[in-house]
Image (tube, helix red, strand yellow):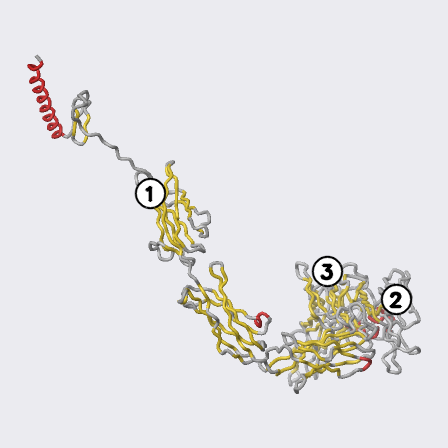
Amino acid sequence: MRRNRQPHSWVKYLAHLTLAGLCAALMSACGGGGGGSTATGGCTVIDPNRDPSLPSCPGTTPVVTKPSLALTLTDTASGAAATSIAPDRSGTLSAVVKDAAGLAVANALVAFTTSDKSGTLAPATGSAVTDAAGKASVTLNAGTVSGGFTASASATVAGATVAGNVNYTVVVPQLSLTAPAIAPATLAAGGTASLSATVMNGSSAYAPAQVVSFSSPCVSSGKARISSPVTTVSGVAATSYTDLGCGGVDTITASIVYNGNTISSSANLTVLSATAGQLTFVSALPQNIALKGTGGAGRQESATVTFKVLDRNGNPISGQAVNFALNTAAGGLSLNPASATTGANGLVTTTVASGTVNTPVRVTATLPGTSLSTLSDQLVVSTGVPEQNSFSLSAAIRNVEGGQFNGCPTPTGTVITARLADHFHNPAPDGTAVSFTAEGGSVDASCLTGLTSTTLTDGTVITQKGTPGECTVRYCAGNPRPADGRVTVLAYALGEESFVDANGNNKYDIGEAYTDLGDPFRNDRAVSDANANGIDDAFKSGNAVRVSGEQYIDSNGDGSWNASGNGVYDGVLQTVPSSSTVHVRQALVMVLSNSAAAISLLEQSPVTGLALSHCTSGTLFVNDTRTYHFAIRDNNPTVFATNARALHAGDPLWLFDRPGNPLPAGTQISLSASNGRVLSATVLTVPNTNDADSAAWTYAVQIASDATQDTGLNCSNPISSGALTITVQTPNGVITNASFPVSD
């Protein structure tokens, strides 16, 4: 039975195989199949339940893509692909990031690293963000070690990390510096030599620019000058050396700093010593020194005198001996040392010590073995203490416009200057303090002679050298204002009493006349400067005696005002030097002028008018010049003693009292006439004065008729009645007008 069925099975198998091949061919021709079949590469499995042991379609592997990062290295300068970098040639690392679809990923953070521990990345964070093209870049700087290294970059895309590497080498040049080439090798004093040094890389000049510094001991000490640093050109650094008194062998050192290391080389230059060509005086400080035994705080008994030795080219010479001598030894003057040697800057000094006699003195400096010598400026040996008779006080403006205006600048305020000198009439030493007090307005408390102080708007005070023996303070108009418009200003300083040196020995001797000074006080009753300084005149008497309420300086500290001195000469110029001093003093009177003017015609009271010559036809016209007097002053009601009518009885120009003070200095007085002709000056200026007498502000005006007469004795006088107008304008712009009738 089995043998009978066996042929049938093979027939059935062959039939199925034939049918399958036919169907496969048909399906292939149709391009595929469907309905539960599986097609692979043109092969279709029709019966999914067929015997798996039978031949079937081959299996398939699906295609899978991922994000990517590509890292490259280029030369930063040229942009060309690079495999190496150097300390002077950086590279650029560029990473391009793409997603799984191969598209650029923008705004992805890329982290860069390098295995070169001495290398650096820029920016220092080592990270950058991709641009729209998916590219991020950083600069890769070489380290200090030659060798091969790996640079890496990584980023995260859709939760997946992508990375890339690139290998590169670092080539560090091996630089050296040639010894400076110097020409000439031996340099004349004051001459100039050329210097050059070459930066080498192995046996070749190193072309990239480097900064080379040149130095030497003589340059460091100011005895030579080198233009340094300089930048190499094709590896060569060139500069110049100028001698300023080196005078010996100078070691020239050239150096560069490369890759954190200093590379240097040296060579010697021989500089010939200079020959002295000039000896000059530099300074004598201070120029005024105290007599021996009279010095004290701020007052020296010695001065330092400085000279300078130069070669023929004007360069300082060091190590040069200089001898010194005084041109007088009066009173025991001395100097030390008598010989000294110049320093690196060519300077040499000696010290002059004072003697006991007031005298000018000079120091002669000489170079031994030469004809070179010079004299110092004059030094003065003096007391340096102000004396009473050599104290003066002045104001730039005596009549300020301060009656109604407040302030310090002109024309409302002014400056007051004190000038002080000693018994020999030499200026008081710089720094002598002068104190001030004022009856009205305000005045700076003090100043120092020989110095000027300027106060800036921010309050900063700048002190500069001023005129010897003098100093200045501000006087400012303001309250309180005395009723008579006159302000006493007192200045005082520590000094000595004046004496008459009868025997001419420059010292006070017992029996010689002297000024025995009591305590200074501010005379607030003063009308004139004389009154303010204790002198009686036509304005005031009793000025030497203080009255209650007037400020005084208690010189001896006994708590009371002493009109007389102590009966003993107080001063330093005595047989036995003394430091006993007193307050020397000086005072002046300022006027706080009112701005409103008072204008009076002195010839008439009441005013009837100015009558000029009258022209009558047919009668010869004699045109006389008439002179009228006007009192033009401020409107202060005070009548000072000399301006009272009672003192001028019988004088036709004194018809009434004349109250007032001078108008402010610089006030303009203008005269104009609508009838007649003013023959005198038509513009007058009020002077700088504190004079209380009316003569200071009385003005004579000459005027004549403006009528004319022809040869036929016919008169022409179109205007026979008019006015003389006086216009007063103060510096602050206050205007006062007054008119007086004029007829002809």
Q: Which residue, given by chain and number where applicable, does mark 3 sit on?
A: 406
- The amino acid type found where label 2 is placed reads Asp
Position of 260 with respect to 324 (left or right) is left
Closer mark to the observer between disc 2 and disc 1: 1
Question: Would residue 725 be seen by someone viewing this image from the given angle?
Answer: no
Helix, strand or loop at label 1? It is loop
Q: Which residue, given by chain and number where applicable, does mark 1 sit on?
A: 104
- The amino acid type found where label 3 is placed reads Asn
The answer to the question of whether label 2 and label 1 lie on touching residues, with beta carbons closer than 8 A, is no
Percent x, y of residue 136? 38, 47
Q: Residue at x 89, y 62 (%)?
A: 557
Judge whether 310 appears above or below 723 on screen: below
Position of 200 with respect to 462 (left or right) is left
Position of 370 with respect to 423 (left or right) is left
Q: Earlier in the sequence, mark 2 or mark 3?
A: 3
Closer mark to the observer between disc 2 and disc 3: 2
